[in-house]
Image (tube, helix red, strand yellow):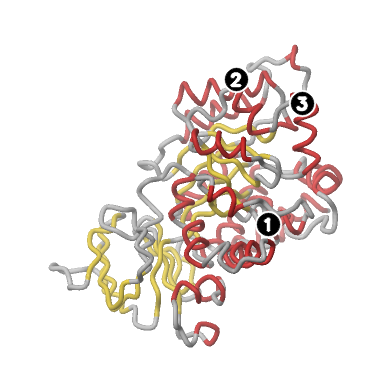
Amino acid sequence: MSVLFTNAAVLTMDGSREPLKNAFVAVERHKITYVGAERPEGVFDRVVDCSGKVMMPGFVNAHTHLPMTLMRGYGGGHDLQTWLYDYIFPAEAKLDPRAVAAGTDLGLAEMIATGVTCVADMYMHTGVIADRIVKAGLSANLSCGGVYFGAAEEFSPDKCNDCRNQQELTDSWHNYGGGQIRVDASIHGEYTSNAPLWRWMSDYAQKHGLRMHAHISETVSEHQASISRHGRTPVQVLGDHGAWENGGIAAHCVYTTPEDWEIMKDKSVTCVHNPWSNLKLGSGIAPVPAMLKAGVNVALGSDGMSSHNSADLFSDMKLAAALHCGAGRDPMAMGAWDALEMATVRGARALGRTDTGVIAPGYVADLILVDFTAPNLMPCHDPAENLVFSAHGSNVVMNMARGQVIYENGEFFTIDLARVRSEVEGYALPLLFG
């Protein structure tokens, strides 16, 4: 299908930081074929008048756990360790593939309606998640979150569930749909595994050309325990075992150090900033401005809806921008364009996807329209300022992922929301919570 967008105010996110006015954007199948001031030649299957709307790339949610939407708000008011071990892990132990599918669909519906077109998700039953994402029409980097709590001397990849999960996931889904689904290797965290798993997962990643996804220095106790055990930070000790050779994602990074940042910059490891989750769990504030200044790529993630309670990345952009200005007592510490880049082009970079996050010819047609006639977006002196500090996910009126309109004016085209509600309320929640 071919689509021509007309009269568009476009934030291309190509580095220029200058919105285009009254522009034309053409899409053929799943690619952008034209962006410019003159109407392109040809006949289009659909013409969309974008008057009163702003077009921007769809958001890349660079660290999330989709099925945890089922646990939204469960166990709130506790620190990370208490929350995980007393609330989340017991609930997760009851999950089955059907419940995971229901939670994934619910999370995807919320993300689609608020402008997300691509995710990096880490969770169990990952093949089920891949299937639901394909049906929803988004793109994703998926990982299983490798853990190993056994004795190091007893480790065997044949007996480690997450080694088998990694192999099955890679064999079944890596580069599915021409790259719609990509598989990452994963180490859940330094504190949930040990050296034999790190070495095996790192070797597997290098052999198969996979990136790595891990939780890093989320809490001060996690960070200090790694130093006590190994004399090295989590970034450093995983790097010592080859985890970062193909680059990847380090989620949270609240207590990372300048020495860590040098490694991350050199190995193309992205910090995924999860400001809402880190604040709600009392974990702290990642030193994002310093990391950016050090040359580290920084993207945005919601984390799981169990700790964030929301998948609205507009909220994360606003918090990220305001938080660091306030914490540093510097109104220039994080600007609107910085936050927009973290949610789009820097997120694409985090996933190793060089064909999304920008509106330009040749890129995947991942784009959203935001209604700037809404009261909260009027008047508009600066589209970037309004998008970051005024907009809500509810202002998204169209989501096009991979050239397919998957949401428009409140209607979902790839997710049956009534069926999702029925599955969540009739099956998944009774299974987990009785």
- Image quarter where the N terminus lies is bottom left
Hey, which residue is sitting farthest left in the picture? 41
The residue to which callout 2 is attached is 200
- Crowd band around label 1 with a 10 angstrom C-alpha radius: few (<14), some (14–19), many (20+): many
Q: Residue 154 has which mark?
A: none
The residue to which callout 1 is attached is 305
- Tell me the quarter of the picture where residue 30 sits: bottom left
Hey, which residue is sitting farthest top in the picture? 153
The residue to which callout 3 is attached is 149
Using the image as rendered, state which of residue 245 and residue 32 is in the foreground.
Answer: 245
Q: Is residue 81 left or right of residue 203?
A: right
Point 44% across, 41% down: residue: 352
Camera-near label (2 vs 1) is 2
First-in-chain label (2 vs 1): 2
Residue 44, horizontal then vertical, whole percent: 20, 68
Q: Can residue 185 be seen in this view?
A: yes
Q: Which amino acid does label 1 sit on?
A: Met
What element does badge 3 sit on? Answer: loop
First-in-chain label (1 vs 3): 3
Relative to 38, residue 83 above or below = above
- Tell me the quarter of the picture where residue 302 sits: bottom right
Residue 363, horizontal then vertical, whole percent: 31, 53
Point 51% across, 58% down: residue: 343
The CA distance from mark 2 to mark 1 is 30 Å
Q: What residue type is labelled 2?
A: Trp
The CA distance from mark 3 to mark 2 is 15 Å
Hey, which residue is sitting farthest front in the picture? 330
- Crowd band around label 3 with a 10 angstrom C-alpha radius: few (<14), some (14–19), many (20+): few
